[in-house]
Image: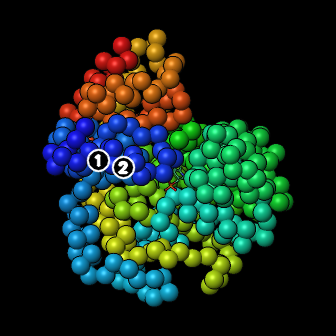
Amino acid sequence: MSSQSGINYRELEAEHTSGVYAKRQLTIVRGSGATVWDEQGRAYIDCTAGQGVANVGHCHPQVVAALQAQAATLVTCQEALYNDQRALFLNDLVEVLPYGLERVFLCNSGAEAAEAALKFARLATGRSGVVAAMRAFHGRTFGALSATWEPQYRAPFEPLVPGFTHIPYNNIDALANAITEQTAAVILEIVQGEGGVRPGSAEFLQHAQQLCRERGALLIVDEVQTGFGRTGRFFACEHHNLEPDLLLLGKAIAGGVPMGAVALGPRVTNIAPGTHGSTFGGNPLACAAARATLHVIQREGLAEQAARKGAWLVEQLQDLPARRVREVRGLGLIVGIELRERVAPYLQRLQELGILALPAGPTVLRLLPPLVIDQAQLETVVGGLGEVLQ
Ligand SMILES: *Cc1c(COP(=O)(O)O)cnc(C)c1O
């Protein structure tokens, strides 16, 4: 459909886009809070949060103000030099990180955070093996993809990085058998996001930490999707009192501006100048946005809001017809509805009702709304789901 300006953005973009994305027939041009608008001015409740990014809502005024001020002050400054915004952000971030994480490598995406962590784990341990979980998602660059499980993502790109094994998630015995003297790291999500919204058990995650300590491997926790209030705690690690050696951050970290990060614990040693780096890593614009985002999450109590709203949402969704719904799972405002059939047609029908939601694998409908979503919007989402799944 053409816009008010007469330009057909969809046709224009489709002509030049790479082809790696399965595109929806929708052009989004504006956002505010949990709402986005298409080029015709039609509003949608955004239960994708831009793929788990807009935890504080689209265009949060404090993030916008921080970006505007910093854009007019200094946009770029390499990490070989010190910078005021970077210093302030790192100081604020470390205050909310799980215990022991006091140093941070800054980059530009979740996959880059995974790459950095895998390299750091090799440096610190002198080992090269990595144990990951089935259904895990850690990104699509070669190291991150080697830790990712989905065969469809991996197969066309083999050979991948050697030394990776995948064990069934939440299976302590399989994990115990997989960690050897060659294992540099175990990498796990607290709730598997792309893999179908599957929460890890406290027992499994705590055992993983203990086994790593006993056997000289490092625990990498991937909170790219679960961090920054999403699950009802600032970091999902807090649900299980975990103290990972490396914590991967991304998506929501900078309120929509591209940023990734790896937080490092005391067992991550041997990180010397020249061992890793990134041109854009720690740039002042992203750091200013990230610091404002962090303050919004704290000031507005967004983790507590996610816990409360998520519990309400899951309770409502339990009443969806069992004929279509196998299970409803979630933690805070990462919620998965596992269907007995393919999810794609339901996402399309929700879109027609003005609700955007995500898949998580072929049969799971995933809701990742901005944490600022209000009660009326949540009720509309529940009503819409009831309508399309009846
Ligand atoms: C999205 C995601 C990634 C990859 O992040 P990108 O920014 O897309 O590279 C890694 N891990 C998890 C858990 C994710 O959800």
Question: On the picture, is 140 further left or further right than 345?
Answer: right
Residue 188 image offset from top left, x and y in percent = 62, 50
Residue depicted at x 45% and y 82%:
78
Residue depicted at x 33% and y 59%:
255
Q: CA distance from mark 2 to mark 1?
A: 6 Å
Q: Which residue is mark 2?
A: 13
Residue 69 image offset from top left, x and y in percent = 22, 75
Q: SS of the residue at dot 2?
A: helix
Question: On the picture, is 195 further left or further right than 168?
Answer: left
Q: Quadrant of the N terminus?
A: top left
Q: Quadrant of the C terminus?
A: top left
Q: Which residue is mark 1?
A: 9
Residue 66 image offset from top left, x and y in percent = 25, 70
For residue 353, which quarter of the picture? top left
The label number, if any, that marks residue 188 in the structure image: none
Under 8 Å from ligand 1: the CB of mark 2?
no
Q: How many marks?
A: 2
Q: Is residue 131 visible?
A: no
Three-letter amino acid code at disc 2? Answer: Glu
Question: On the picture, is 300 further left or further right than 313?
Answer: left
Residue 334 image offset from top left, x and y in percent = 43, 40
Evaluate if marks 2 and 1 touch, with contact meaning CB atoms under 8 Å apart.
yes
Q: Nearer the viewer, residue 78 or 304?
A: 78
For residue 300, which quarter of the picture? bottom left
Q: Nearer the viewer, residue 109 or 1?
A: 1
Residue 67 vs 213, above or below: the answer is below
For residue 381, which quarter of the picture? top left
Residue 265 vs 368, above or below: the answer is below
Q: Residue furthest right?
A: 181
Q: Is residue 216 visible?
A: yes
Q: SS of the residue at dot 1?
A: helix
Three-letter amino acid code at disc 1? Answer: Tyr
